[in-house]
Amino acid sequence: MEAYPIIKLGRLSAVVSFAVGTLIFLTFILSRDEMWEFVGFYFLLGAVLINTAILILLLWNLIFIRDQRINVLKAIGFLLLNIPVVIIYLEIVGHFEKNI
């Protein structure tokens, strides 16, 4: 059975958020330019808002669409995997800020 569009959107959002966030993080680490801190901060705000909205839609589908529960759970897990990555990135950036 083909996945519902929200499942594809959840997976895509997780991958894009991770890729763009990692690119911003690595650019900051390599350049040490404060501009990338601001870019990262505003990207983080936008990603949290968008991913939270997608998470709510996925949870709604988890409750009401029985035939795709496993796929919805996988998409939710994939989306939530970005949280520990963000925490690690913030810890590393904080460490760099203390040493500058």
Image: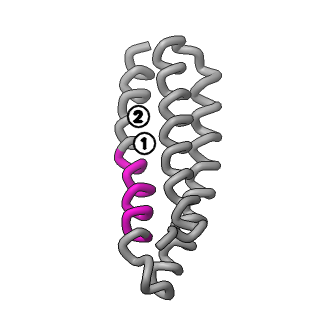
Camera-side residue: 73 or 88?
A: 73
Three-letter code, disc 1: Val
Magenta extent: 72-84
Q: Residue at image x 37%, y 63%? A: 74
How did the renderer colour the structure? one colour
Vertical order, 17 against 28 (above or below): below
Camera-side residue: 67 or 42?
A: 67
Vertical order, 37 against 75 (above or below): above
Does dot 1 land on a helix, a strand or a loop?
helix
**Residue named by callout 1:** 86
**Residue named by callout 2:** 89
Q: Quadrant of the C terminus?
A: top left
Q: Residue at image x 61%, y 57%? A: 49
Rendering coords of residue 17 (x, y %): 54, 44
Q: Residue at image x 51%, y 68%? A: 3
Q: Residue at image x 62%, y 57%? A: 50
Crowd rating for badge 2 (residues with CA inside 10 Å; few <14, some 14–19, many 20+): some
